[in-house]
Image: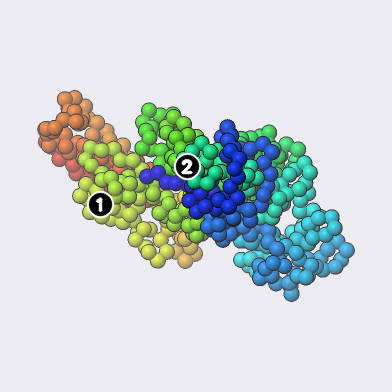
Amino acid sequence: MRRRFAMLVFIVGIILVLGVFAATASDEPAPTSDHTGQTPPEDAEYVGQQTCFTCHSQTHRDWDDTFHATTIQDVSANPDIVVADFSTGEEFRTLEDGTVYTLEDVDYTIGSKYRQRFIMETEGGYMVLPGQWMRDTENWIEFAAAPSMVEAGCVSCHGTGYNHEDKTFSEFSITCEACHGPGSTHVEMASNLPENVDPVSDEVLAVRNSIVSTVDSNVCGQCHSVGMAPDGHPAPVGYEVGGPFDETMYVHAQPTGEMDDPFWWPNTGHNDQHFEKFPRQQWITLAGSAHGNALASIVEHDHGAEYCLPCHSTDYAFQDDTFPEDVVTMENAQFSITCVHCHSPHGEAHIEDQLTQESYQLCVSCHTGTSSGGRPIRVGGTVHHPMREMFEGISFLNLEPNPSPHFANEAYGPICSSCHMPATARNAYFGDVATHTFQLILPTEAVEGQPDSCTSCHDLTHDELTPEDLTFYVEEIQADTEDRLADLRADLEEIQSAHPEWESDAEDKSELQQMSERVHTLLSFVEADGSLGVHNPGYTDDILTEAEDLLDEMFEMEE
């Protein structure tokens, strides 16, 4: 199903219906533009999030509940935002002249989810004060002061409209124009639309194209990556939202393979990606993951088709086809699975981490072999990514249901992200920011201090297990499943090769051919699940046992 991506520019039609611009509409002809909306129009200026609120009030309210809206906050406007205990931590709050700053000296807070730092407005600008408060452990820790928040580059990601050359910015926090670009042209063109304009006219399209609205992960990557500009500045220099994001603007921190690397763990996952240590590296690891290359995986292979795109291309899945120019197909799809496929920039779903759905439902909306029950598995069919059906032990081809013990444990059973997104990075402590490699880390593969995919749930002391025990369990299941699959495929191919007359689309099939097709689908289910039995060892055994029994019967029939 095509979903409409509720970014601000697609609400123009609603605005027109409500007549928001009727009072200010000009008699002048509505302006037109050849601008594509990929990058901001030339000479556009920042207008501030309150201007956006005038028309996009509900989107603004949703955004206002996200952490993006609270990266820098004014203490005088809301004193309750300060969570630190200023009766402690004097040794961390000592300035260079020996004085200790107090709550009365604080004008703004910076950060709100994991930790909180403090800003004092001075004649020279905005000084980031020493020390920071850790929200989870409720204590002060050491953190160096910065004489100028702007010079230090903090505002490039905690504010909007940062100008590297003249060291200015538009406003505090990550507001609308941080992701959509400066909006003055958009506001001017919208206000000049004639009353009762056709909502699918060229004039409205021009207004739509006067602001950036893209699912490109580069927009997120300007802050959710670690490195520095070629000139040494900590923020990307020269990046425009919607445009390219390359080494001429930002050189990403590369793994050294050493334990003391501050950004990366020395070990890698199964796709040779290093795991994150530093929290804001989601863009880098997503780009190298299978999700980040999902579109290429179907475009570059003969089996790719348009029905694959809802789960392989975010611009296809989120397209608004109001205008012909916006229709996305196999020929013009640009993006794989990007950040906004899973995370809502505006936070309208009001789910933790700004997810578009609850975590498990989000994963299995694509990792399902039946479209979550909408497309049955049929004898002779080749199954595609049935992770949900395997994990939940959902019946197919009349097999008895057999849910995984992990799924059946409703009290604290793990979900996809529990194992495939171990929290390797730290904001306050290692274990509070998930990897976006989507790769497992077995207990014996983890290095010292690194969270893995198993022991966050399996307490080794309580369960009297060792890391070797857990790894052995996984590897034994996979080795056994792999061996059984290889033997069964060989047996099936032997029978099929003896019957070259079989045609898959024949109307009248022999009993032996029907049994052969059933075995193929059973094996395909296990193969396409991809875990080699780990998602559900019991159900995997049921399926392969059924295939083995059928093949034994088929060989007897051939004698």
Q: Nearer the viewer, residue 360 or 63?
A: 63
Q: Considering the numbered disc 2 on the image, is that residue within a helix, a strand or a loop?
A: loop
Q: Look at label 1 and name its amino acid.
A: Ser
Q: Nearer the viewer, residue 31 or 73?
A: 31
**Residue placed furthest toward the top:** 500
Answer with left or right where residue 59 lies relative to residue 174.
left
Check residue 5 in the rendering and tell me which mark sits there, or answer none: none
> In the figure, 522 relative to 331: above or below?
below
- Residue placed under numbered mark 2 in the picture: 198
Q: Earlier in the sequence, mark 1 or mark 2?
A: 2
Residue 56 seen in the figure: yes
Residue plotted at (18% across, 42% down): 550
The percent coordinates of residue 394 (x first, y second) are 28, 53
Q: Look at label 2 and name its amino acid.
A: Asp
Answer with left or right where residue 15 lies relative to residue 258.
left
The percent coordinates of residue 139 (x first, y second) are 68, 68
**Residue placed furthest toward the front:** 27
- Residue placed under numbered mark 1 in the picture: 395
> Where's the C terminus, which quadrant?
top left
The percent coordinates of residue 354 (x first, y second) are 52, 55
**Residue placed furthest toward the right:** 97
Specify the color scheme.
rainbow
> Where's the N terminus, which quadrant?
top left
Q: Residues within 10 Å of mark 2 (few under 14, many from 20)?
A: few
Answer with left or right where residue 187 lies relative to residue 407.
right
